[in-house]
Image (tube, grey):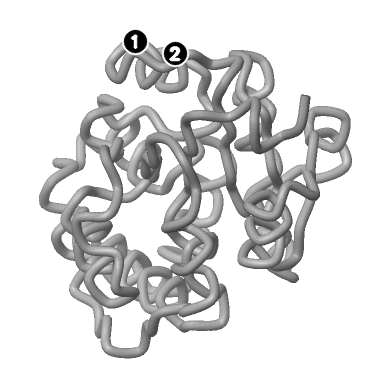
């Protein structure tokens, strides 16, 4: 059975997956996180950035580390670090065309919050396109690649895991996807996320692409 005929639910990461990693959004978020930590934990910016990276590696998100170790209020943090200039993000017309051709449900699964997702989707001309958005708040602030939210999204949206594909730019986020039954597709954005573990994740990656629009084109044309 071809990939296209097997899948009826399409689960997409948001950042650096549905828009280019070169957009500059992540760099803005990274900067705001460092400034947030410096201000709220009363430390210099250099130490704040080191703590930011440490928590991201250890906890999956900087937020989770701040919550667990410092009692930082999640919604306050998310509001502050998403005060972004979204005008730098633009739609990928080829990708949007292929997304619209996919048959079945389309779901966003992001470690960001819903407001950020909605702001990005507006910029890339995909407002009201996705059937569901599963954000970090819905996941009880437990980030990918912790496996609990993967099981939660299956139960919440009544997903048949064996008929579902998940796309993410971070390879290790697809390890639990494979374990719960999703077909994992790694979107290699051309950079290595400093918290990723590509070598240990490779055996769990069913597909890999450097261009999501071309991959979906192949799916839509029945080549996969």
Residue 73 image offset from top left, x and y in percent: 14, 41
Crowd tier of the residue under label 1, counting other residues whose Cα lies within 10 Å: few below 14, some 14–19, many 20 or above: few
Q: Looking at the image, which residue is at 27% across and 89% down?
A: 87
Task: Name the image quarter holding the C terminus.
Answer: top right
Q: Does 61 sit left or right of 86 as displayed? A: right
- Looking at the rendered structure, the secondary structure element under dot 1 is helix
- Res 119 quadrant in image: bottom left
Task: Name the image quarter holding the N terminus.
Answer: top right
**Above/below status of 97 relative to 13:** below
Q: Looking at the image, which residue is at 26% across and 38% down?
A: 132
Residue 204 image offset from top left, x and y in percent: 79, 28
Q: Does 212 sit left or right of 45 as displayed? A: right
Q: Nearer the viewer, residue 84 or 130?
A: 130
Q: Does 16 sit left or right of 122 as displayed? A: right
Q: Nearer the viewer, residue 103 or 141?
A: 103
The reply to whether discs 2 and 1 touch (Cβ–Cβ < 8 Å) is yes
Residue located beneath label 1 in the image? 155
Q: Looking at the image, which residue is at 54% across and 76% down?
A: 94
Residue located beneath label 2 in the image? 151
Marks 2, 1: nearer the viewer: 1
Q: Tell me, for residue 91, which label it has, or none.
A: none
Residue that lies at the very extreme toward the front in this rendered image = 221
Q: Looking at the image, which residue is at 63% across and 56% down?
A: 216
The Cα atoms of the two marked residues, 2 and 1, are separated by 6 Å
Q: Nearer the viewer, residue 95 or 219?
A: 219
Residue 179 image offset from top left, x and y in percent: 66, 15
- Res 188 quadrant in image: bottom right
- Looking at the rendered structure, the secondary structure element under dot 2 is helix
Residue 8 image offset from top left, x and y in percent: 50, 29
């Amino acid at each position: 059975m071809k990939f296209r005929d097997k899948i009826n639910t399409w689960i997409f990461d948001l950042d650096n997956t549905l828009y280019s990693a070169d957009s500059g959004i992540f760099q803005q978020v990274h900067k705001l996180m460092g400034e947030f930590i410096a201000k709220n934990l009363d430390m210099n910016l250099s130490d704040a950035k080191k703590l930011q990276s440490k928590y991201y590696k250890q906890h999956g998100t900087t937020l989770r580390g701040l919550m667990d170790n410092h009692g930082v209020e999640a919604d306050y943090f998310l509001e502050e670090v998403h005060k972004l200039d979204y005008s730098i993000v633009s739609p990928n017309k080829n990708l949007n065309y292929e997304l619209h051709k996919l048959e079945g449900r389309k779901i966003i699964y992001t470690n960001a919050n819903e407001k950020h997702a909605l702001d990005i989707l507006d910029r890339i001309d995909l407002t009201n396109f996705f059937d569901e958005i599963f954000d970090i708040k819905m996941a009880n602030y437990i980030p990918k690649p912790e496996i609990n939210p993967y099981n939660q999204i299956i139960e919440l949206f009544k997903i048949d895991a064996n008929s579902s594909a998940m796309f993410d730019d971070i390879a290790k986020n697809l390890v639990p996807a494979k374990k719960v039954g999703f077909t994992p597709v790694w979107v290699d954005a051309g950079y290595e996320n400093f918290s990723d573990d590509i070598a240990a994740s490779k055996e769990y990656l069913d597909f890999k692409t450097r261009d999501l629009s071309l991959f979906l084109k192949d799916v839509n044309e029945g080549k996969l």
